[in-house]
Amino acid sequence: MGHHSRREFMRHSLYGALSSAAMMSGFGRFASVSALAQSSGAANDYRALVGVFLFGGNDGNNTIMPVDTAGYGQYSTIRGALAIPQTDILPVSVGGASDRFGLHPAMPELQALWTQGKVAAVANVGTLLEPLTRDQYRNGTRKPEQLFSHSDQQLQWQAAVSEGASATGWGGRTADRTRHLNGAATFPMIISIAGTNLFVTGIDAQPVAIASNASTDPNSGNYFGLRGFNSTADSQARLNAMQGLLAIDADMTIVRSAAEMQQRSVANAAALNTAITSGRALTTQFPNTSIGNQLKQVARILAGRATLGLKRQLFFCSLGGFDTHNAQLGTQSALLQQLSQAMNAFYNATVEIGVEADTTTFTLSDFGRTLKPASGGGTDHAWGNHHVVMGGAVRGLQMYGTYPTLALGGQNDSGSEGRWIPTTSVDQYAATLAQWYGLQTSDLSYVFPNIGRFPTANLGFMA
Amino acid sequence: MIERTFAPRLMEASPSTAFAFLTLRAVKNISLVCLLVCALCHVAQAQTGDAPVLLSRANSTRAVAIDYASGRGEPFGVTGRTKTRDFRNRGAVAAKSTQARIVLYAMNVRRFPDENASAFTAHADANASDGTRLRIRLPVVQVNQVAGKEWMTSIVVTVPNELANVGDALIQIAFRGVGSNRVRVGFGRIGGGLPDDAGARPTPAPTTPPVVVPPTINPYTGAQPVADTVRFLEQATFGATPELIARVSANGFQAYLDEQFNSASSDYPALEPRPLSSADYCTAEAAIPNCFRDNYTMFPVQVRFFQNALRGEDQLRQRVAFALSQIFVVSGVDIEQPSSMSPFARVLLRNSFGNFRTLMEDVTLNPAMGRYLDMVNNDKPNPARGIEPNENYARELLQLFTIGLYQLNLDGTLKLDASGKAIPTYDQETVEGFANVFTGWTYATKPGATPITRNPQYYLEPMIPMANNHSTIAKELLDGVVIPATAASASNPNADLQIALDNIFNHPNVAPFTAKHLIQKLVTGNPTPAYVRRVAQKFNDNGAGVRGDMKAVITAILFDPEARGDIKNAPDYGKLREPTLFVTSILRLFNATSDGIGLVDQTGGMGQRVFQSPSVFNFFSPFYKIPATDVTAPEFGIHNTNTTLYRSNFVHTMTYDRIRPSTLDAGATGTIINFAAWEALAANPANLVNELDRTMLHGSMTPAMRDLITRTVTNMTTTTASARAKTAIYLVATSPHYAIQR
């Protein structure tokens, strides 16, 4: 919070380099992107990371829970009316034992993928400045700022920085440091289907946002491109004037920022529409849900990825509604069902496209929730949480990290209501994913400035 | 932090160093005067005069500037030494290495005594060593009138490390949202850097001292300039109309406020509560057309919202209520029945011109909010069942609606502890304390029903207390206030509620927190701390000893010198027109016929579906900064490649097409613009563009923009008035200049 002055880069290239031809391409061809020379450093293989942010704070305690007699006993005693019946829990194999943990009953699809070794869990992950014990926490040792606040914890999960404001997210920074893997391809590495946010923001990386229902059809109300232009001279003149206006008053930062967004949107939309149109039509059926439609949009882009010439892509999706202070059982069940069905469809689509081993999907969320119930059949904001990763490169049939001891006021509880002090940091979880994606060890500390404080930068869940 | 400066060594016999010497000696006295005078300060209501002028040397645009500590001229370094008095060490004087500071000199700065450094911003444009162009903020740390030369203002800024050895930088200051000329200053070396601005000329100190014209307070009575009238209406309404521009310009802004403060409120439809199950109701009542849409979605209140915004006379009340709805958020994402949203929307309309304390209470007891954030039927602790009171409303009331996470100064900046860290306003125990306060409330009893501890859903009346379900344990509030434990027989939910709401209302954060939010919603995303302070002072005391008077706050926001004036050209001034205002502003200006149906789908595609915020955190965060800049611009949080295309395509729809009438609603008209008045101007493209400039950009169109649009329209092969008018309107409405309300 000091007097950090931050640079504001004038991205003049956006005014100069994008010619009228690029602008025009929204209405015709976009040839340049696919004719890319591979420059030095470009990757030969393809990899994609797909983040799914569960906004509101998913209750991990009811997502992955113990099924063995002792563990379930601890769980159900504290959970009370919120406990999932033992026989409803979907058991999964962890390290060869199939009687210890299970998934929420609304997630049979993820259970099946788990059994195939395509899904793993990471237990008790959360925001940390450094490893932290209950005693240290209660003695006021350094802890993340504004625990239990949605906005702050969302930003910290996205930034992988839990102290002071961060101007960038770990997705954006990863993109900044892996850009070379895409060679001469100019299309942005990051695509968000859920608006823009800190996670997708880098110093250089500028994400493309596309709605899940965005259409490549110019006649659609949701056309992802500029509507209403044709080849007549007047139409072209209007288009050129519209572009010309973007370069006027460029010294007004706030006006220029709006202009840059318009400039990027037209050029990027044209290229992305071309890619999506060029991709094979998928036969995989996606559920008609918010997250289903988002992941379907990702799948369509994956199918057309060759046209963009990218070797690395980072996607962001989200599902909201997890802030289950009230009536949690029904709400969370419906949400986890949507998540499980959508992730399953997405996995099947990656198989259909042939990128199942090259695509890794992972969850993020504000925080976990109190093990102890709150009035109204819900739970309150907590901290450490359990997450899932999915893909052909995941080392499955395993739960990584350490599942907390389910005891109020116990060794993992920050207080007395079951707010778990994380035993694995967001930094470690994210760094494991980023390294699989292609981030070099030498760039780890740039993307994850605090990673050196933790015992390992690689949790081992990626092959 | 108290810092004392000593007279600089005078290394260079130039007029500038002499000024500096006087300045620095005067610092302490002027500060004292400020402190004395500020106690009497009312919200400054000054006419924005001309732009401030940074002084340069006689024959070039090189600034008159000196190093603050040494008195040396350029080139400047980025580190310096400042002598400070260490009061923890018996006042010993210690020299410490700090960022270098330089002093610039300006004239034509007509400021009130309380417009100190926090009323100014400064930035530098330079070429960084790696060739990138950088724009960097220079923190302004002191501003003083030069003793004996009161027409001259000295401005001390800190030099950030990024400017080390960049050579020449162009520096601009801004005051009340108006930027100065840019002057040239060398860092590390002299030379290089960006070329001077087109038309830039030397701005030396005049040989004859200018007459000092003291700032005046403008009551905004009587006729006002058209340009500022358009700006005023952009801040106070859902969009200017030709009729309003003429009327408000003629009668003045105070008259408009008087009219608005006394106008009857718009309303929302009185909707019947429906059974919980939409399937049951809509199956049983199959004859009802659009049963689900009209009874289980926000559709009816969304349609009315746009009807009100487009045609209601109570524009300011609605605009403030819309701002409040994005602070005190209830969302139809979780609340199904529109019958619950109408009463909540009325709470905001009713309290827009009331008192903030009443607003807090009415919001707290509104059942839609109760349902949304789980205060309704929030049970007292139940140790036997291991259940705690629900923390949701307690936490968000504190964090999002009233005080925020960190202690604030009156000007909205963060209070810092000795180690320079922000200080939290509360902790988990406080949240739990308030969570216990907010127990023991249930839905109002439906007419004819028997009250029970946990009444079933009913949204037409405020929630009611149920003493037997209220927590009686001790409750920790803010600032060390504790509501002591009571016997169950003395349980009193309402008494606790009043104590708790008073406790929050009287917290020093409420004024700056609310002031800044409302300024951001109405005027600019980046208010200076001085602006926030002036409004916060009015929140704390309306001049008659009343705290929380919304009329005083709104007046202070709209009449502030940082809000008013014909042209605001500071680089970070203004705000992106959020989707709702973008849509309504265009429809109102161009005299659209609209039934209000389908407009929420338009704003929704742009990221703002009214009454359906994705969460209690609103559509965008008040803290959002445009990436790679220092510019706080909340609305940019939903501005991306997808939504920006949607905005342009909305303009296309409205200029070249229309929103077609709903086929589900008898008598639907759709939304269509009437271009007749604009087509009448199209025979002369220059006149057409001038009128668009006047009404859409309040005369701020630059010659380059005017030329480009006029030329495009003039050269069209189709010369019909319609085609010309549409081309010009499309170009202005899709321009980044119109996207930004400034």
Image: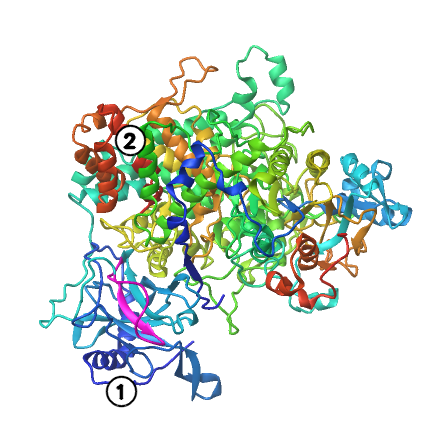
Q: A424 or B359, which is in the foreground?
A: A424
Is A309 one of the magenta-colored residues?
no
Against B82, residue A183 (above or below) is above
Which residue is pictured at 34% across the width and 49% down the height?
B574
Left/right of residue A390 with respect to residue B399 in the rendered view: right
Is B188 in the magenta? yes
x then y, percent, for residue B529: 37, 60
Residue B448 % position (x, y): 58, 23
The picture quadrant where one finds residue A361 is: top right
Callout 1: residue from which chain?
B
**SS class, disc 1:** loop
Q: Reading the chain from its start, which is encountered first: label 1 or label 2? A: 1
* Residue wearing tag 2: B727
Q: Which residues are magenta?
A: B179-196
Residue B525 rendering spot, x and y as whole percentages: 39, 51
Q: Is residue A199 left or right of residue A406?
A: left
Identify the residue at the far top of this view.
Answer: B287
The subunit carrying tag 2 is: B
Residue A98 is labelled as none
Residue annotated with mark 1: B11
- Do the residues bearing badges 1 and 2 touch, measured as CB atoms within 8 Å? no
| Disc 1 residue type (three-letter) | Met
- Residue B314 showing in the rendered view: no
